[in-house]
Amino acid sequence: MKLLEVRNVEKRYRRSDEAAVKGVSFDVNEGKILALVGESGSGKTTLLRILAGLEQMDGGEVLLDGKVVAEAGGGVAPEKRGIGLVFQHHALFPHLTVDKNVLFGVRKLPAEERRRIFDELMELVGLEGFGKRFPHELSGGERQRVALARALAPNPRLLLMDEPFSSLDARLRHAVRDETRAILKKRGTTAVFVTHDTGDALAVADGIVVLRKGVVQQTGAPPEVYHAPANAYVASFFGTCNFLPFNSLGQPGGARVTCHVGPPGLGNGESGLWVRPEDLELVSPGAGGLAGVVETVSFGGGYQDVTLRCGTDTSLKVEVRHHAPFMVSVGEEWEVVAKVGRRY
Ligand code: ADP
Ligand code: MG
């Protein structure tokens, strides 16, 4: 069941030559988590603010539960949309204790009801006993969970989050995003979150919308956008991707590089293959792979990221994520072959 429908949304700020959002459309089914991902300035926050009712749009419409809540120049007031918000820096009220922060949106409900909501949410986010602490007495991860609990307290139909993990350091970030997904899934909450971090999007979302300069590049499940990118931009945005022109692969049957993402020649005039570094491996010369010389090696612990110069004129740079059993060094000659068949 579709909960949110975004149809051809257009937004141009005054005093701005270029539209911030250009004909964006996507749906979110009930209980699903959608990530809007893109570089800084791609229109993510603008879209989120339009969904929340904090920004007017110039064209298109937004439907919630099949009813229009926003259209050009108007819409349902933000507080009547049943939407919960988590902002970039969690923005807890610093002078209010955790219980007052969490219950802020439901402060008009009877005390008994508030108590029930509070207990349920604190159990959900794993913060029982934290009610009387102030925000400055919490860790970054705890503050994020309080912000989530506060947004969920009024039981919103839709939760919107803007860069919810960006203020956390790398280690905490991974834990908090897994936790956030688990909490939303446990409650069956439908959510849209914005991030510039492809790792956040891949790990947390059920569906991803990739934006570039206000235009949707691709919509799909995480493995789809990663393994079957719609164009060269999406392929590279989600991580290193080698483009291997067919003419670099020698005669048919000569070079075995058959594992690729996306269609041959994706978004590029030439025909060739897009291949991720982890889908390639190094074998000894003479195996019939793509021959090359190791140019750089970066040790990553359980793997080495290796760059080779390949092809007869060594003009082709190929990146391979190489997993032990053996280590490779700069200057060595290896051949590159595909690890598995096409993944997606
Ligand atoms: P993102 O969240 O993806 O970084 P934004 O939605 O914040 O992107 O911004 C999209 C574009 O709109 C940017 O070019 C930005 O400069 C512009 N923009 C955002 N807010 C305003 C504003 N209030 N007035 C004018 N331009 C704005
Ligand atoms: Mg933003």
Image: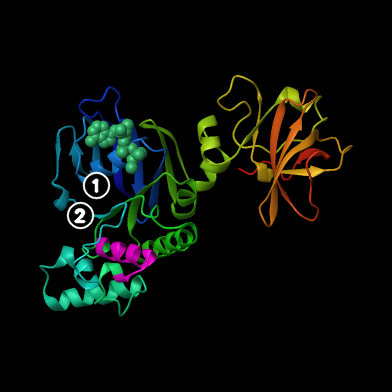
Where residue 299 appears, as percent x and y from the top left, is 69, 51
Q: On screen, 121 above or below 68?
A: below
Mark 1 crowd level (few <14, some 14–19, many ≥20, 10 Å Cα): many
Instruction: Identify the element where label 2 is drawn.
Output: loop
Q: Residue at x 39, y 62 (%)?
A: 180
Q: Residue at x 51, y 35 (%)?
A: 234
Q: Is residue 175 left or right of residue 330?
A: left
Please give the label number shown on residue 64.
Answer: 1
Count of marks, rendered view: 2
**What amino acid is at disc 2?**
Gly
The residue segment tinted magenta is 137-151
Q: CA distance from mark 2 to mark 1?
A: 9 Å
Where residue 251 appears, as percent x and y from the top left, is 81, 24
Q: On screen, 49 above or below 73?
A: below
The image quadrant in which ligand 1 is located: top left
Please give the label number shown on residue 22.
Answer: none
Q: Is residue 74 left or right of residue 64?
A: left
Mark 2 crowd level (few <14, some 14–19, many ≥20, 10 Å Cα): some
Q: On screen, 195 above or below 15?
A: below
Q: Is residue 63 visible?
A: yes
**What amino acid is at disc 1?**
Leu
Circle 2 is placed at which residue position? Answer: 82
Considering every residue shown, the one lying at the far right of the view is: 286
